[in-house]
Image (tube, helix red, strand yellow):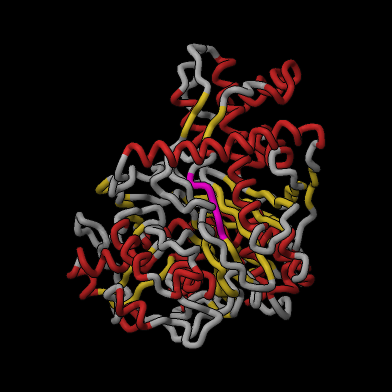
Amino acid sequence: MQQSLLVAVDVGTGSARAGVLTPQGILLGRAERPIAMNRTDANHAEHDSEQIWQAVCGAVRDAKARAGASPHQVVGLGFDATCSLVVRDLSGAPVTVSTNGRDRWDTIVWLDHRALAEADECTRTGHMVLDFAGGVMSPEMEVPKLMWLKRHMTQSWARAGMMFDLADFLSWKSTGSLGRSQSTLTCKWTYLAHASPGWQQDFLERVGLQDLIVKAQLPERATPVGTDLGALTPAAAADLGLTTACHVGAGLIDAHAGALGVLGAFTPDASTIDRHLALIAGTSSCVMALSAEARPTAGVWGPYCGAVLPGIWLNEGGQSATGALLDHIIRWHGAGGEPTPQMHQSIANRISTLLQQEGLALAHRLHVLPDFHGNRSPMADPFALGVISGLTLDSDFDSLCRLYWRSCVGIALGVRHILETLNTRGYAIDTLHITGGHTKNPVLMDLYADATGCTVVQSSAPDATLLGMAMVAATAAGLYPSLDSACSAMQQPGANRSPNPAARLQFDKDYRIFLEMQRQRQAIDAITGPRPHTLSAPPTVPMPFPVG
């Protein structure tokens, strides 16, 4: 008898990735297909959801071929995706969200910042829903985008008959189910999973979305993550190269799937899960903290009930530009150029040599605030700017390496700032579980331990996000009685790195400087005067790892 297998799908900003995994969590085959993005304005970004579906189907077929899997072996499927907004009419056809008027562009990308004014308007309401969104509405959430669409594209709003977070669109496309995941609705649509009713109609009325529930065909109650949404339709099975015996689980936002993959196994002991922090780090970084109780934290999204695991609360923070910042430093410096993997490796090798020669005091008068694209957490300030203190006229390769090193220090201290903020709210974080592109950067991996004082765990899973979605698929297929049990059974071991005690004095000093630079930046901004009303464009490079 052939072994049952699972398919996990992870849709990021620039590509759709698929993996075939065993019920024990072993990845057998992986494939990736690019997805397109349309930019009509610096703050506008759109996807074509049909093209995303085609990319998903191609990636699934490729992964299945690489794993040597037959369609009949695949019994479960799970989708995660960025928190992008898909708009369809009542018949299921695409409805344009683009100022160019072309219906193929029916999806507002998560990083789209067209709704800055609407986000500020939501924040000014002071409504209770903000207590479960870090106190500030982000333009990357769905409600401001929906407000903008209703106000500025009235014809599209009139035509709309269904609206989805991208992960929910994919489950609808594959099963026909209009169920919406508790992950997506709770984190991006102001749905309160712990409350009854979950939708706060008075808030929707205050922001002009009184018709949203009907217009978007939103359910009264969200569907818990991992719930079986049904089997593939014949059409979807044919597109994916699978069978109608394959069941689909309610999915997650992409970064949350990564958190599930690395933290899910700790849920049997909910009393200690708050010691662990998931860091999903690539072009930008997301941090995920789970706890058995709600812990509101200013500048950190959440707390969200059941957004990753049933009965568990999630706080989500992040850094808007991390890998993107290091790429920028390489392009910007005279000794840099294109930030290829080889260039990053050459810099890392030279930094290793310089550290052996000069110790941790390397470039100790050079300091970087890494907020080149705002501060997502814990300051929740999209207008924050990066700062470099201590420049000289040096322009050789070693000066690039010193600046790169201190930029990495700033990124790691930014994580420390987030986790120390969380620890003031009842967390006791002492372990970082890291997945994503940063695991390939030895400079950052050392700093995440030494600059934060935390033990760093790197999962042996080649792709923790796909592992998280395989846990969802296994639950939907009935291979395990609950999502908790699937996480425990499918977890993969990790390699631990403890912080270097000898580094503590240096990085404690650096952290004091880091906080002082933030205070000085605020003082300078106060003298400078009013801030701009619009942001610079978000990074346009593809995001190779989940960002939430």
The part of the chain drawn in magenta is 316-320
Q: In this view, does 34 lie above or below 326?
A: below
* Picture coordinates of residue 526, whole percent (x, y): 37, 41
Quadrant housing residue 365:
top right
| Identity of the residue drawn at 59% across and 79% down | 227
| Residue 150 is a magenta residue | no
| Residue 318 is a magenta residue | yes
Quadrant housing residue 176:
bottom left
| Identity of the residue drawn at 48% across and 12% down | 393
Query: Which one is in front, 79 or 440?
Result: 440
| Identity of the residue drawn at 33% across and 55% down | 46
| Identity of the residue drawn at 45% across and 56% down | 55
Q: In this view, does 439 lie above or below 175?
A: above
Q: In this view, does 169 lie above or below 416?
A: below
**432 sits left or right of 346 in the view:** right
For the stretch drawn in magenta, the main secondary structure is strand
